[in-house]
């Protein structure tokens, strides 16, 4: 097998969780974009005007305060009657945004249709203007509608590109976690495996030491065979003379 093919197989064996999870995540994001219901958003703008010239900073501070009141019950109760939603529903459909440099409030409304989103934003903006102008003598500022909400041309959610990107990123994260888990499992198995001997000699069992023979007591005489062998080895003269005599006696008896 060629080296490039080996490298390709090694990369596939190592990175297959990521290669599989990323397309699946992107496909899941695309599927969510297809089956989810669209949501539209429209924004109306309210301007805070000071009663006395030269109090722009005061108008900006009041814009911050009234921007927080856009989602409060005292403002949403009046707008709920106009839109047909309950106050609890409007709390999740409307939110106000302000700028630290300008006395302006952006009121954003959402809905399942463009007309619904624009109508919700305009209703809350009118309710906020009416609520704030009721105490204009005490605050020395007035609220006016700068621009009504326009019906959006396209939904804000779902976004096919964003959902596919989010799904692919989620798949990448899952694939990386699977790879980390597989590496840890392989390292643990390698550590737990017993070490193999370096050579066949190391694998042989140790030799059993020979059991020493108990010494024979001095009083015990050795057998006759052992006595004869010892006598022959020692080369005693009596034994040497006795052997020819025995040979002559054997020869005479043969005659």
Image (tube, grey):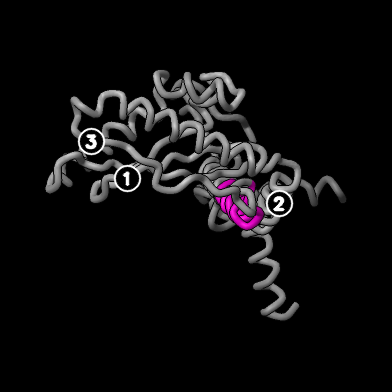
Q: Looking at the image, which is closer to me, 130 or 177?
A: 130
Which span is picked out in magenta? 158-174
Q: Is residue 58 magenta?
A: no
Crowd class of label 3 (few under 14; some 14 to 19; many from 20; radius 10 Å)? many
Q: Which residue is mark 3?
A: 141
Q: Is residue 173 magenta?
A: yes
Q: Is label 1 in a helix, a strand or a loop? A: strand
Q: Is label 2 in a helix, a strand or a loop? A: helix
From where the camera sits, is residue 171 visible? no
Q: Which residue is mark 1?
A: 104
Q: Nearer the viewer, mark 2 or mark 3?
A: 3
Q: Which of disc 3 and disc 1 is earlier in sequence?
A: 1
Say the numbered circle drawn on residue 30.
2
Total count of labels: 3
Q: Position of residue 100 (x, y in %)?
A: 24, 46
Q: Residue at x 69, y 73 (%)?
A: 6
Q: Position of residue 22 (x, y in %)?
A: 65, 55
Crowd class of label 1 (few under 14; some 14 to 19; many from 20; radius 10 Å)? many
Q: Nearer the viewer, mark 2 or mark 1?
A: 1
Q: Looking at the image, which is closer to me, 146 or 57?
A: 146
Q: Which of disc 3 and disc 2 is earlier in sequence?
A: 2
Q: Nearer the viewer, mark 1 or mark 3?
A: 3
| Picture quarter with the N terminus | bottom right
In the current view of this chain or complex, which residue is farthest to the left? Answer: 54
Q: Position of residue 199 (x, y in %)?
A: 56, 58
Q: Residue 139 sits in which quadrant?
A: top left
From mark 2 to mark 1, how far is it between C-alphas? 38 Å
In the current view of this chain or complex, which residue is farthest to the right? Answer: 255
């Amino acid at each position: 097998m060629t080296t490039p093919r080996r490298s390709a197989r090694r990369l596939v064996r190592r990175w297959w969780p990521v290669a599989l999870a990323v397309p699946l995540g992107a496909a899941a994001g695309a599927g969510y974009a297809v089956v989810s219901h669209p949501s539209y958003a429209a924004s109306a703008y309210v301007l805070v005007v000071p009663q006395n010239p030269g109090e722009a900073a005061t108008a900006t501070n009041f814009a911050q305060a009234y921007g927080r009141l856009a989602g409060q019950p005292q403002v949403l109760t009046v707008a709920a009657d106009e839109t047909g939603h309950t106050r609890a529903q409007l709390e999740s459909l409307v939110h106000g945004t302000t700028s630290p440099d300008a006395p302006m409030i952006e009121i954003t409304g959402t809905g399942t249709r463009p007309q619904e989103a624009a109508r919700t934003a305009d209703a809350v903006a009118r309710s906020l203007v009416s609520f704030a102008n009721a105490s204009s003598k005490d605050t020395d500022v007035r609220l006016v509608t700068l621009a009504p909400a326009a019906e959006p041309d396209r939904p804000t959610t779902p976004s096919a590109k964003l959902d596919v990107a989010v799904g692919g990123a989620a798949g990448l994260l899952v694939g990386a976690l699977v790879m980390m888990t597989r590496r840890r499992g392989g390292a643990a198995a390698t550590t737990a495996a017993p070490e193999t001997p370096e050579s066949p000699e190391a694998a042989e069992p140790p030799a059993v030491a020979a059991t020493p023979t108990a010494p024979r007591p001095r009083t015990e005489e050795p057998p006759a065979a052992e006595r004869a062998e010892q006598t022959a080895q020692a080369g005693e003269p009596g034994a040497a003379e006795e052997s020819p005599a025995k040979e002559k006696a054997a020869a005479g008896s043969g005659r």
